[in-house]
Amino acid sequence: MVRYDINKLQMQNIELKNEINSLHEKTKGVAKEDSFNVVRASQAELQSTLNNLSKDIQNLSGRFDESKFYTENTLKNMTTEIDIIKLQITSLEGQIKDIKTKLDTMENQIQQQKEKAKEQKKEEIDLSKKEETSGEDASYGAKAKYDAAYATFESKKYREARDQFEYFTREFPNNDLTANAYFWIAETYYREKDYENAILAYETLLKKYPENKKIPNALYKQALCFIEIGENKVGRVLLEQVIDRYPQSTESKLAQKKLDDLNKKPSKKK
């Protein structure tokens, strides 16, 4: 629009110049002074109009330059905003990729857990069939199965022994030897140095059978497991519980000795 106004004024300016030139031609043959004055007046008026048009052109040119500057500046700002949006999109794409990777990892872990559970179930079924077809008769009861599991443990076949003891706890949940079976399950993890699972297994015994004779040993071993994984503070607390609750037990003396050993060296984890 501004460009159109400028062109229009320029055309008017050209027309005025043409009129002035025409007046000059007409005044060449005029001799009378009054006619000349009239022409001069007309020329002055036209010149004034021309000057005004020139000013209008300058104003419009200024507006055009201002509009051009604003447009260029706006385009520059838009370009900057577009670059920022591109960076944000790139960042979001990276985040989406990370999330997808984590989801894939989780799916793999879930699949592995399913396969592990399936394998354990199969082992339980195989173990059950093995015991059913082993020629045992009605007189071969809970004690015989417990003794068989313990013999496997003594042979250092800890995984197989654990399966047998777990089967025993399910088959004979109210038997007098069931608490012992839970203890030996925890012991299989401890012997394999799987201290975290051992802690959980000992805790099962502590909660289910708090008055069982193996509780002092279970509490002491649980303390050792915490120390093995760097949780010395928790381990110390459990050792002190062994000493306070079972002062006459063998585990109480072992707990005191372990505390003395810990006090001789700085704790790794407070």
Image: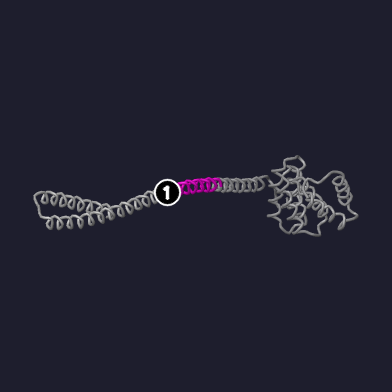
Out of 31 and 193, give the one closest to the viewer. Answer: 31
215 relative to 60 in the view: left or right? right
Prevalent SS, magenta region = helix
Mark 1 lies on residue: 82
Q: Which residues are magenta?
A: 83-105
Q: Is residue 100 magenta?
A: yes
Mark 1 is on which residue type? Ile
129 relative to 95 in the view: left or right? right
Out of 51 and 267, give the one closest to the viewer. Answer: 51
Out of 57 and 225, give the one closest to the viewer. Answer: 57
In the rendered image, residue 138, in percent from the top left (x then y), is placed at: 71, 52
In the rendered image, residue 91, in percent from the top left (x then y), is placed at: 50, 47
Out of 171 and 240, give the one closest to the viewer. Answer: 240
> On the rendered image, what quadrant is the N terminus found in?
bottom left
Q: State the residue lying farthest toward the right.
A: 248
Residue 94 in view, yes or no: yes
